[in-house]
Amino acid sequence: MTDWNPQQIKKLRDRLWLSQEAFGERIGVTRNYVYYLEKGVRQPSKTLQLLLDYIDMELDGIFARLFDEPKEKELEKKKSIGMVPQANHKSC
């Protein structure tokens, strides 16, 4: 899970071309809370950090498909946030 700082949150919102109000509506918080997150007054909860990770991963996936980036990068990101189970190999 990414430890989201104010600059990363604003950068993600900017990548989505959303106002603070529109971004807040999509992630389930108020415009004021988004403002506080971007100013460093408030820290995102673990749940919100996971949601931001997911949004960021999906956005990266969209760009990867648009620009033909390797799928391995997207898979590694999914693994890093626990969205893809790790294979358990047992010796015979």
Image (cartoon, rainbow, N blue to C red):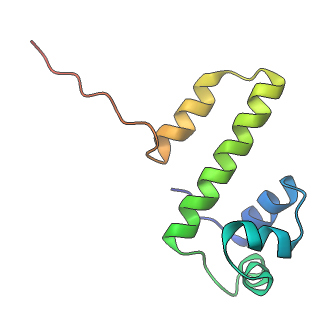
Q: Nearer the viewer, residue 1 or 16?
A: 16
The residue sitting at 80% across, 66% down in the picture is: 10
Q: Which residue is drawn at 24% across and 28% down?
A: 88
Decide which of 50, 30 is in the foreground and name it: 30
41 on left or right of 77: right
Identify which residue, 23 or 67, lies in the foreground: 23
Q: Is residue 62 above or below residue 81?
A: above
Q: In which quarter of the image is the C terminus?
A: top left
- Numbered-mark total: 0
- Is residue 69 left or right of 20 when viewed as pictured? left
Q: In the image, residue 89 lies at what x, y percent?
A: 22, 22
Q: Give the image quarter of residue 14.
A: bottom right
Q: Which residue is drawn at 71% across and 81% down?
A: 40
- Which residue ends up furthest to the left in the rendered image? 92
Q: Where is residue 39 in the image (x, y as percent from the top left)?
A: 77, 81
Q: At 56% across and 39% down in the image, what residue appears?
A: 77
Residue 19 image offset from top left, x and y in percent: 89, 69
